[in-house]
Amino acid sequence: MKKLAVFLSVSFAFLIASVAQAHAADMYFHTHLVTLSPNGVQIVWEIAPGAMIAQGIWQDADQDGDGIILEQEALAWANVIFPAFQVTLDEQTLALTCVDVDWPVDIPALASGEEPIRIHLEADWPTSIEGSHWVTLRNRYNPKNSISWYEVRGKSGIVFRTPEQNRGRLHLEFGPSDWGEHIGTGTRWESGSPTIPKAVESLGLGEIAAEAQSQNTPGARSAATSILEGFLRKQESSLVFLLAAQLIAALLGMLHALSPGHGKTIVAAYLVGSQGRFHHAAVLGLVVTLTHTGSVFILGLLSLAASRYFLAADILPMLELVSGVLILALGIGLLLPRLWQWRDNKQRQRQMEKAPVEARLQPDGGRRLVINRPIEEPGPPHSHDPSAWGHIPKGAQTSNNPFSEIRWRSLVTLGVSGGLVPCPDAIAILLIAITLNRIALGLSLIVSFSMGLALLLIAIGVLMLQGKRLFERLQWFDRAAFIVPVLSALVVLGIGTALTIGAVGNLSAVPAQMNAVEPADAAPVFDLEQAGVVYAAPDENGKSQLFLVPASGGEPRQITDEADGVWEYTITPEGAAIIYSTANQMETDLWRLNLADSSREDLLKCPNAFCSDLVWSSDEGILFYSRLELDAETNASGVSSIWW
């Protein structure tokens, strides 16, 4: 039982499903250095594209096709890109100007992240900075494939509160130093950057990864890519170095295979349900290695030769679709014959239960047991004559059982589907190797990386087969033996269906253009004739009431008439109603006043409590308020709580 428990826990760790994450090779990494001064804002926008898309950006900027980016070509490219960056001051959009562009010296420097593209932007404040102001910066360039970092500095007496960042959007309050003396302000803030994973440190590879990332935008390379890139850049070719590089690449491939995906569940289900053996698992791993290496090589060459027209990242969803369809077809091919065999077995069992067995008396007084059903042997008709072969012909016990042995066609199909979708990090290594003119070493590292991935798949397959033998020792497993192949086929079919559906969704989400720009927020429609100003003022009885005056001018109109007056109020996000509170001795009510017809409704009663401080949430969908219980027994400390 202890072995069984260990097997179940390890198997669950291997087979748990999860959504695969995006790879650094096909993403954009943005770093923004923002300087706030009394006169305006200066921005240094660094763009570090992944290795799979760097070639396309270079060719997009190279207008004359000579492979060299001139200053005017860099400025022309930046002038197309920088309108995707937007800065607003107190909700007023500022006019940004592209001052200069720093372009990398060559494609290897851009692809490796050593030299990102730097776009220098600036804008002047429309008014002098006195008191507090709100500034919002938003990067709308390829938002779905981008990660953004911000660093903000205050200059010449400008201070600011801690900014709020949401992906490519940054929102902060700033002002002169005399404004921020007592409210907790600062002059420097940054988003921060991820650290090297502990798994890399445990292998003793932290220094190599840190060296490869030191010249790069934070997070622009995964740990595996950084380590393998470090080997490519190290100008050494000794035998010890090459062997160590291949070994570490294989270990990284095994670690990579432990991440979500890579067909671990499919391999386990197929081998267990199909009576697999060790050599089947080995062949499966070999097919995965060859397919994965070949797909990386072909897709890498395509991304170099035709990156002007499409990106390798655009092809990956198509390969995912092909892989999903192959697994789906394999699942159907496994399920149908196993269902038929399972049905035949159930019918045979019912016949055996109904078969009459009787004992007949013989003339000599003995008894003879008679079974009124045919006794069939598995397999096709064959002879038991020992003079022929001396044994039952090979295959007689298995040829009629569709799941008693693995078909090589299905095995190869499974291996191809598992290795067809290449790892973008492996493609990035190939592209870096080509740009550094170390193609042989790069290919060998990719092969070792793929072999490490395949070795782990083989180990999982062997582990599952060994675990199956543990199950076979249990009595209940004999009764469930015929249903296991059907269940394994259902697992393969279900995974194939899920992969196909997911690939179709990813395929429909592929952007039509490489330089996709998120549309700017639509400007709110403001009609001065329809707008109004709401304010609170005492009425003729000295009670606070709400008044409405047209924004275009006119006489104010009293819109509330509460006996005890209005305590607090807030306007709904769409501007169609007002939420206000009233208090009457030991009770507070929250009311909604519809501005269109002046009707009101009682939203909430706060008996024996005081409800106030009405605030809408950031997404403008929830109304928060504070509640102070007035009962001394239930709230002896007199502390308010937040409700919504």
Image: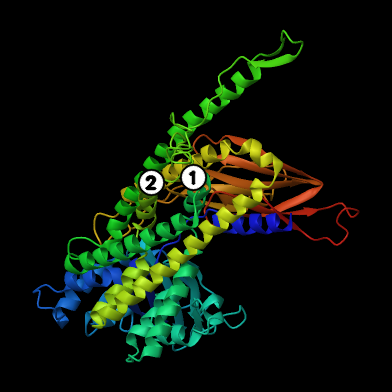
Asked if residue 528 can be seen in this view, the reply is no
Instruction: Check disc 2 and report the residue beneath it.
Output: 410
CA gap, disc 2 to disc 1? Answer: 10 Å
Occupied quadrant, residue 372: top right
Q: Position of residue 503 (x, y in %)?
A: 37, 49
Residue 270 visible, this orientation: yes
Q: Residues within 10 Å of mark 2 (few under 14, many from 20)?
A: some
- The amino acid type of the residue labelled 1 equals Ser
Dot label at residue 274: 1
Residue at the extreme top of the image, as rendered:
363
Tag 2, which secondary structure? helix
Q: Amino acid at mark 2?
A: Ser
Name above or below for residue 563 compared with residue 314: above
Residue found 42% across the figure and 76% down from its top: 249
Q: Assess disc 1: are there few (<14), some (14-19) or many (≥20) residues with their C-alpha within 10 Å of its C-alpha.
A: many
Q: Which mark is residue 186?
A: none
Q: Residue at x 69, y 58 (%)?
A: 3
The percent coordinates of residue 155 (x first, y second) are 44, 87
Earlier sequence position, callout 2 versus callout 1: 1
Question: Is 103 left or right of 26, judged from the image as shown?
Answer: left
Q: How far from the left and from the top, in percent, is residue 75?
A: 19, 77
